[in-house]
Amino acid sequence: MSTSQKHIYTGISLAVLAAFIWAGNFIIARGVIKDIPPVSLAFYRWLLASIVILPFAINRFKAEWPGVKRSWHYLFWASLTGVALFNTFVYIGAHYTSAINLTLIGTTTSPIIATILARIFLKEQIGWMKLTGLIFCITGVLFLLSKGNFQTLLTLKFSAGDLWSLTAAFCFAIYNTLVKKKPASVSPINFLFVIFSIGTLLLLPFYFWEANRTPAVIWNTDLFLAIIYLGIGASVICFWIWNIAISKLGAARTILFGNLIPIFGTIGSVIFLHEQFTRVHIVSMTIVFAGILLANIRLSR
C-alpha cells in the first residue's frame, strides 16, 4: 500500500470515528437539554475542553505565539463558526423543533454548503463521482428520517428551531472550509487549544446573560458525566481527528462522513433506548455507505 493510500484510509477511519462519537453527542445532549440551558451547555463543554487540552498545547502555544498573532483574524472566524456558534445553535434549535427536523437540516444542508464553499474558496474539484456520492448520502439520510416514505418530507413544517439548525449547518460548513486553510505556523494541537479558548471567551458574555434569566443549574451525576463526554469526547478527541481527516481527504469529501451521524445515532438508540431496528434502518445505512464509497473511490485509486 502506497503512502498516499495510507493517508486516504487513515482519513476515512478518523472521519468515521468522529461521526460515531458525535452521534453520542446528540444522544447525550438531548437527554440533558431540559436540565441545563443551551448556552450554558455549550459554555461548560468548551470550558472543559480548553482546560483538558491546555497541558498538551501550552508549550506549542508559547513557541507559536508569533504565528498565532499573525493569524488572529483566521483563528477568530474558525473559533466563532466551529466552536461558539455551531453546537450552541443546535442546542437552541432543539428547544423549538422536532428531532427529525433538527437532524434532517443539519445532515443534509451542511455537506451541500461545504461542497460549494470548497469549490469557490479552495478550488477543490467536484467530479461526477463526488456529486453522485453526495446525492446518495442525502438520499440515505432522507430515507431514514422519512421512515421509508419520502412523502412524509412534504408535510414537514419549518419553525424557528429549523432556522437555528440551518444556521448551525452553515456555520459548520464554513468551519470545515476554514480548517483546510489552517496556517502552517500553528500546529494542530495548538490550533484546537486556541479555537476552544477563544470560543469559550466568545460564549462567556452570553453565558452570564442566560444565567441571569434562567433557573440555576442543578448538578447531578448524569449531567456531570454528560459534560465530560461533550467536553472531552465530542470536543477534544472529535475535533482533533476530524481536522486530521480534512487534511488528508479535503473539506468537501470529509464532511460527507457527517451523514453517518444519524446512522450511528439510530444504532445508539436501538442499543440504549431499546428502539426497534427495522428495514428502513438497514436500507438507509446501505445507501449512505454506498454514497461515501462513491465519493472516495476515485481518490483511493
Image (tube, rainbow, N blue to C red):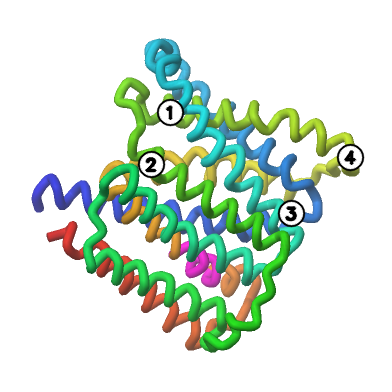
Q: Are marks 2 and 1 in contact (CB under 8 Å)?
A: yes
Q: Amino acid at mark 3?
A: Val
Q: Which residues are magenta?
A: 260-267
- Distance from the alpha carbon under mark 2 to that under mark 3: 27 Å
267 horizontally vs 224: left or right = left
Q: Is residue 13 visible?
A: yes
Q: Nearer the viewer, mark 4 or mark 2?
A: 4
Q: Position of residue 103 (x, y in %)?
A: 58, 65
Where does residue 255 sit, x and y in percent of width and height? 39, 55
Closer to the camera in the image, 88 or 266: 88
Relative to 203, say whether 126 is above or below. Answer: below
Name the residue at 26% across, 49% down.
124
- The residue at which mark 1 appears reads as 191
In space, the residues marked 2 and 1 are separated at their CA atoms by 10 Å
Task: Quickly name the residue at label 2.
Answer: 243
Q: Secondary structure at mark 2?
A: helix
> Who comes first in sequence, dot 1 or dot 4?
1
Residue drawn at (30%, 25%), measured in percent from left and top?
Answer: 184
Lower position in the chain sequence, tag 2 or tag 1:
1
